[in-house]
Image (spheres, grey):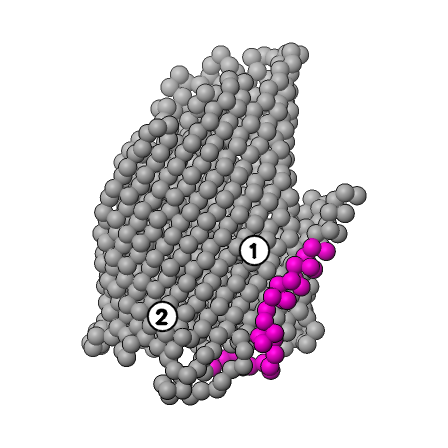
Amino acid sequence: MSRTILDVRLAARLSVMAAAVLATIPASAQTGGDEPSGAQPGQLESVNVRARRSFEDRFESTAATVTVSRQEIEAMGATSVADILRQLPGVQVSINANGGVEIRMRGMGAESTRIMIDGSPASTTRRGVQLPLEELPADIIERIEVVRSPSAQYEGAAGGSVNIVLRQAQTKRETVAYVTTQHVWGEIGPGMFVSQAGPLGSAQKVDPKDLKQRAQETRWTYFVALNGGTRNLGADTERSSQISGGPSIGSSNATDVTRIRSENWVLTPRLNGRLSATDQVAIRGQFSYTNQDGRSDSSGTGVSGGQATSFVSQSPWQFNRHFAQIAGDWTHRFKASRVESTLSFERSKSDYGFDRSSSSLVGGVPFSGSSSFFDDRSERAWLLRSKWMAPLGDVLFSTGTEIEQRRLQVDSTSTNSGGATALDLAAQINRTALWAEAEMPVASIKSTFTTGLRAQSYKLTSEYVGTTLNNDQLFWQPSINARTRLGPDTQLRTNLARVTRVPRIWELLNRSVPTLGTNSPNSPDFQGNPNLRPESTITMDVGVDQRFTHLGQGGLNAFVRSQSDVIARRLSLQSGRWTESSDNVGDALVWGLEADLRGNLKWAGLSEAWTLSTNASMLFSRLQSGDRVGTRIPGQARYLANVTVAKPMRLSGGWYGGTTLSMVGSADLDSPSTSGAVITGRTGSHAELDVYIGSVIPKIGFWRLNVYNVTDATRNTSRVITDSNGIVFADQSARRFTPRVFLTIGTRI
């Protein structure tokens, strides 16, 4: 009954907040007739990133770039950024029990994929989470750019970069509102989304070629959105462990049940305007609040030293996060060039803590214990970025600079039977970059070359227990990308570059974060490492893009990565608990092959409204130095494959729907150890099937039903650790996220 009352109250809050957001829009912005959605006098261009608006633009880029536009996102029936990314070539998306997203490209570690929002590095969250899934619904995304080949303009990453561009202010007057409900584990999670966009005040029609008229034009546009609600998250995990070869022979079977109730609110305002015929500005922000209440309960039985054992533990926990970002973009146009500049500030405050109580019976003798952990985190960052672009004859030249500072402060307290430990920790990254890039055509061979050079300096600082560690380094990132026309519908792309990956800021904190649930090799604690060195990679790519007359278009891409100072995880047993820490484990070679194809299904006897999108990757790697020579990089899947068949949403009305099958191959977990133990392991392959169906009722609204993980896929993981004394510890786990159902009902005006 209490849960029902909570849901009713929350639904009422959703309605009130939605009305409040719409009420904040000036009356002048809500008057006047609708305008066409195409380019208009006064239409403002994006000043955040280079504008590549559709999948077709892959034929105009020298880098291996795939872009998903707003129209394609709407047609997908996607509800989150994860739904979109998993359909893109070479992208592996994993969602943990807490709702966080881990994104891998080229099968490499999540740390080798650079995540940007509006062209700026994404704010960090908790360990192992690149993006807070609950804060990025599909409706807030303008487009997603996946850059698989480095260039001088962006810092780059060994795997690739994902740039998520949030919705922009626009001249088309539009209001979208809908409510949604989630059903999983017998629980309901209500949510809502409301947005409004359009011009501020009345619009004066001008001739875009007349500079005098454009100078007198004062056209401002806005976009504001509020989304929020609750989500039920979690997973069920079955674990089995066995110890052999020593005096402590034993085995156990345990079940971990994780359940989380997550409440999230995100306000996203945008304002674009022209100050003159040559100057335009954009002011944007994002303000979010997350509150999660959860618990992870474990129970199990086993045998230890010939005695029967049983145990129960309960770990209620809570996580709160406040995040605020405000940024300004300014573009000034000269006669034959332009300057784009961005200044951004962000601040986040979060706290995370849990209390664990446990009891056990060993041979009929009871034991009990308790522990707690609390983190108070504060992160702040600012970024200044500027770029100048100009044609110099047949050469398009661009140069720019970036200055960024990011600081993380953590007050951490942990207690157990041995007493209490309090730590005051901090880590800071100062980054300065200067880059230049030139794009030049070579008509004799029908090619376009883009050459670039990026100089980037880092100062990494880690503070703990009265000790300060500094690591100052300067890196050069040269790159060359080439695009050669082999025919009217065929082109060849090549890339050669060097990139450097700096450790993420939370990896530098010298403290241990306990895992929830049963501590085991497959669910270890995490230990930071202030001595981490940046990872350097030489990248090489060769790809072919092809248009097909009736089918659509596709591509085939081969890549090689030669890495130095690879950052990977080391697993060890510390003070009776399994712990994983980041470390530089040696050099490695990574290579693979990717293929993708998309188009309509007219060739299969269906109408052109039906689309097919499919991609597959084969991935390989070998460590070439260190203590695990000859093994694959831990966690690299052997293959990735996605197939989506869909009938896109049409605003003119009618049925739409689709299905996506995602397949991820097995991955080795042969990880280096700090204690000299031999560690082998593997994650099993799995497949997930998602389906959705909906209908658009013209001039009224739409509805959509999404069912995720129809196959109830199991994530199987196994590890075997053999120490120097011949003692063998084997651990197996099977995690289930269960199917999830979403029903959405809304309108678009």
Q: Where residue 444 is drawn, which disc sits there?
A: none
Of residues 407 and 261, the one nearer the viewer is 407
Total numbered circles: 2
Residue 495, position as x, y percentages in the image: 28, 60
Above/below status of 577 relative to 46: above
Mark earlier in primary sequence (1, 2): 1
Q: Amino acid at mark 1?
A: Val
Using a 10 Å C-alpha cutoff, classify the residue at mark 1 as few (fewer than 14 neighbours), some (14 to 19) or many (20 or more).
Answer: many
Side of 168 relative to 97 (left or right): left
- Secondary structure of the residue carrying tag 1 is strand
Residue 37 belongs to magenta span: yes
Could you tell me which residue is drawn at 40 percent across and 75 percent down?
275
Of residues 240 and 403, the one nearer the viewer is 403
The image quadrant that residue 706 belongs to is: bottom right
Q: Which residue is mark 1?
A: 266
Residue 712, position as x, y percentages in the image: 62, 46
- Residue 581 visible (yes or no): no
Magenta-tinted stretch: 12-40
Above/below status of 457 relative to 33: above
Of residues 678 and 132, the one nearer the viewer is 132
Quadrant showing the C terminus: bottom right
Q: Amino acid at mark 2?
A: Thr
